[in-house]
Amino acid sequence: MSSAEHNTNTTGWPTQPGVHAGFADAIGNTPLIRLNRISDETGCEILGKAEFMNPGGSVKDRAAKWIIDAAERDGSLKPGGIVVEGTAGNTGIGLAHVCNARGYRLLITMPETQSAEKFATLRTLGAEVIPMKVVPYSNPNQYQHAAGRLAKHLPNAIWANQFDNVANRQSHIDSTGPEIWTQTSGKVDAFVCATGTGGTLGGVSRSLKRFNSKVKIYLADPQGSSLYHWFNTGELKATGSNSITEGIGIARITDNLKDSPIDGAIYVEDPDTVNMVYRLLREEGLFLGSTSGVNVAAAVQIAKQLGPGHTIVTILCDSGHKYQSRLFNRQWLTEKQLDAAAGPVSPSLLDAESQRVLNV
Ligand SMILES: Cc1ncc(COP(=O)(O)O)c(C=O)c1O
């Protein structure tokens, strides 16, 4: 463990339950939220793990902490060192917080197509961010390979390598899975989530199957991703055209995903994702990003397959704040022909006489 974050309690002030020793210690133990309308409609308990309530705002805080902890433990990350990562955003945000709290510098390579809010947030947090052209994984200039090369080149630097560093998956074996098991008192029939690195699915699946091998594990896959076809046929091949979702959907089997105990795959198209994001906002009071929409839409499909009376857990990955310029922008949705899926804009509450009442 690094000293910066952990040895600051010099007064001997007692640590109470719920009081955390620094940023990283506050990661995890997120609430499990019953999605009331969706549960009542399906006759299943559909529960969302509120990962947007992590201190850095997403499920990827867990991976960031475990990756840094592992590098400190094995001695590769030394005091004052540099962390380099290729990220679509949230892992970078989690890493930026942990790096700040522990005295490391952070260098990020990110596909230039990611939202402006993500670039701005990372830079505000103090990371140096390099936008990268979008090229296939096989191209050496793909953003992840570039991150690996920079980490080798810079002195006292490590590559977080979230895709193939299984400390990512381990975070969910050690924390998310056991939390779900405890929070449901072991009454969980199915778990579903989409994959970016496969860390969440790879880790939670292993953890829940160890508690009870009968828990069904489902992979949720957005359009444009290759895993739905891979699960059904063994061949990595995209289904449908590119998705508007950010941070999920892949075309290879990462080390974090490899050999995960998966029982089924659910395909989710963008209109269903957008529709679910807006339902979660209007009907459940939850302001969430697109990947949460994929996950809950998949959970509803599973509820229909399994029938009433089952408990299905999924992940509410991050909040909607980073997506105001896209997912929550009507003009952008219209350009993507997804406006109808979002549903009608609420009519104004003000009638003709309201201006007179407003300005007396
Ligand atoms: C918003 C969001 N949802 C889901 C995921 C996927 O999680 P994992 O990388 O554990 O598969 C990510 C990954 O970056 C993400 O940023």
Image: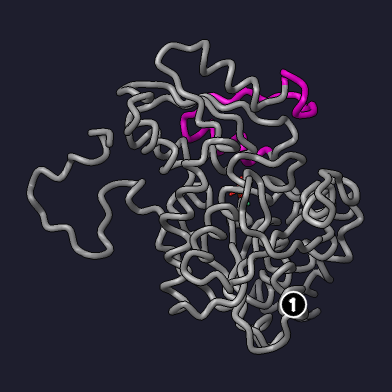
Q: Nearer the viewer, residue 166 or 91?
A: 166
- Give the residue at the far left of this rendering: 12
Residue type indicated by callout 1: Leu
Q: Nearer the viewer, residue 98 or 336?
A: 98
Q: Give the magenta part as a residue range.
A: 116-141
Q: Position of residue 325 (x, y in %)?
A: 72, 47
Mark 1 CB within 8 Å of ligand 1: no
- Residue 317 sits in which quadrant? bottom right
Q: Nearer the viewer, residue 214 or 353?
A: 214
Horizontally, residue 227 falls left or right of residue 10, namely: right
Q: Position of residue 39 (x, y in %)?
A: 65, 83
Q: Position of residue 78 (x, y in %)?
A: 33, 23
Tell me, what colour scheme is on the image? Answer: one colour
- Vertical relation: 307 (above or below) 341: below
Is residue 120 visible to the viewer in this orientation of the structure? yes
Mark 1: secondary structure: loop
- Vertical relation: 124 (above or below) 343: above
In the rendered structure, does residue 310 fall within the stretch colored magenta?
no
State the residue at coordinates (56%, 16%).
Answer: 150
- Residue 295 sits in which quadrant? bottom right
Give the number of marks: 1
Horizontally, residue 187 falls left or right of residue 193, namely: left
> Looking at the rendering, in which quadrant would you find the N terminus?
top left
- Vertical relation: 77 (above or below) 354: above
State the residue at coordinates (41%, 73%).
Answer: 182
Q: Position of residue 186 (x, y in %)?
A: 47, 77
Horizontally, residue 285 falls left or right of residue 186, namely: right
Residue named by callout 1:
350
State the residue at coordinates (64%, 75%).
Answer: 360
Disc 1 packing (10 Å; few <14; some 14–19; many ≥20): few
State the residue at coordinates (70%, 59%).
Answer: 219
Is residue 355 visible to the viewer in this orientation of the structure? no
